[in-house]
């Protein structure tokens, strides 16, 4: 039952985030969350690796925002770097190639400028705020956010960074992001402390009790 | 001429906000600040008619900027434009007397509504 509720909460909030992204790029965007996993990092390190590797290829562009107050953790929006350049053009309302080569770009175009990083950081900020904030509104928990950040990782550096960040648990959401009929596989990873997981489950229990009143 | 100060640490968001408002209010003149501290200094220097303010920023966050601006100029016209969708945050901003709390992304529809409020405020002031 807890799993059903948390999946539903993320589906609602990700749906809202899809609406927001559509407004930014002025195109129809479908965001789907096919599965959510809760992973205990110490025991399931390989599982986290498998979760990401199965779905996302190449270097990772990771937009992050840390939060504390009722819950302490870090939310990360992860997409394959190779797909992000054209997405940035869309966000900036700049000319993009035809649909067939929409996400295929040359190597020289892969260099990201400070403005590109600023765009991805702001988009990540908006999307992650929407997802975490909506869940917070539902569960009646408040977050204080730190400044957003964006980094490009190779896969191993990302795992090392994630393993050493001091958070015991991680919620992994695979997301499929469809824009102009092109699918991009991505993920949202929410790192949480043990006490935050306990509070989260407690809040879900309270929400469940409200349903049964 | 309407002068508008946009305080936002994202250059992308500054550009989106200014471009959309400019379409609705061609007479508007824009100034920009990249963090809360810079925004406060710019306000004191420029005395703009309206402020568009982000909340999550380096050095001084947006809610603290509102508090300090209110002390400096009780009549400051402040729009908050933030990614934060938390009800508690919106309530705090409204309590501090901001004109509108607008969630990012700032769109043409939101710009139209904002321009309407600005025009009404200018007309009220005579």
Image (cartoon, coloured by chain):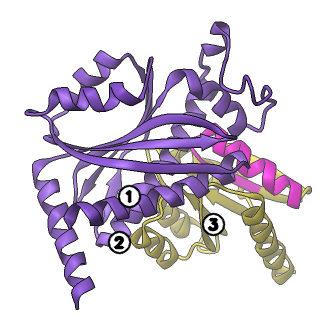
Q: Residues within 10 Å of mark 1 (few under 14, many from 20)?
A: some
Q: Chain of mark 2?
A: A
Expressed as whole percent of the image width and height from the top left, the position of residue B5 reads 70, 53
Residue B78, numbered label = 3
- Tell which chain the image draws in yellow: B
Expressed as whole percent of the image width and height from the top left, the position of residue A173 reads 35, 45
**Dominant SS type (magenta):** helix
Both labels 1 and 2 in a single chain: yes
Query: Distance between the Cα atoms at labels 1 and 2?
Result: 11 Å
Residue A138, numbered label = 2
Q: Residue at x 76, y 49 (%)?
A: B18
Element on which disc 3 rests: strand
Is B46 in the magenta? no
Both labels 1 and 3 in a single chain: no
Element on which disc 2 rests: helix
Q: Is residue A193 visible?
A: yes
Quadrant for the C terminus of chain B, please.
bottom right
Residue highlighted by disc 1: A10
Q: Using the image, determine if residue A210 lies above or below residue A140.
A: below
Q: Residue at x 63, y 54 (%)?
A: B105
Element on which disc 1 rests: helix
Expressed as whole percent of the image width and height from the top left, the position of residue A85 reads 63, 25
Expressed as whole percent of the image width and height from the top left, the position of residue B97 reads 55, 77
Magenta segment range?
B4-24
Q: Chain of mark 3?
A: B
Question: For residue B34, which quarter of the picture?
Answer: top right
Q: Is residue B83 visible?
A: no
- Tell which chain the image draws in purple: A
Query: Distance between the Cα atoms at labels 3 and 2?
Result: 28 Å
């Amino acid at each position: 039952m807890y799993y059903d509720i948390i999946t539903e909460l993320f589906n609602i909030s990700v749906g809202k985030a899809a609406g927001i992204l559509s407004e930014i790029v002025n195109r129809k965007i479908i965001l789907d969350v096919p599965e959510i996993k809760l992973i205990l990092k110490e025991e399931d390190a390989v599982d986290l690796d498998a979760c990401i590797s199965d779905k996302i290829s190449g270097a990772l562009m990771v937009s992050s925002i840390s939060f504390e107050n009722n819950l302490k953790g870090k939310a990360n929006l992860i997409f394959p770097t190779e797909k992000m350049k054209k997405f940035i053009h869309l966000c900036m309302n700049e000319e993009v190639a035809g649909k067939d080569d929409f996400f295929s770009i040359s190597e020289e175009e892969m260099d990201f400028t400070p403005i590109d990083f600023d765009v991805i950081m702001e988009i990540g900020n908006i999307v992650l705020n929407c997802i975490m904030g909506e869940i917070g509104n539902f569960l009646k928990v408040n977050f204080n956010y730190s400044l957003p950040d964006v980094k490009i990782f190779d896969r191993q550096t990302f795992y090392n960074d994630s393993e050493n960040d001091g958070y015991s648990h991680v919620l992994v959401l695979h997301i499929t992001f469809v824009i102009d009929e092109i699918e991009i596989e991505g993920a949202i990873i929410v790192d949480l402390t043990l006490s935050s997981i306990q509070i989260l489950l407690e809040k879900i229990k309270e929400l469940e009790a409200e349903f049964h009143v | 001429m309407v002068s508008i100060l946009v305080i936002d640490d994202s250059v992308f968001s500054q550009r989106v906000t200014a471009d959309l408002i400019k379409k609705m209010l061609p007479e508007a003149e824009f100034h920009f600040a990249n963090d809360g501290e810079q925004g406060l200094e710019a306000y004191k220097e420029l005395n703009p008619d309206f402020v568009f303010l982000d909340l999550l920023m380096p050095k001084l966050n947006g809610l603290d900027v509102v508090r300090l601006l209110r002390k400096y100029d009780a009549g400051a016209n402040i729009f908050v434009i933030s990614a934060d969708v938390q009800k508690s945050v919106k309530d705090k901003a409204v309590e501090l007397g901001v004109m509108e709390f607008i969630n990012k992304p700032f769109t043409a529809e939101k710009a139209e509504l904002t321009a309407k409020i600005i025009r009404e405020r200018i007309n009220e002031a005579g």
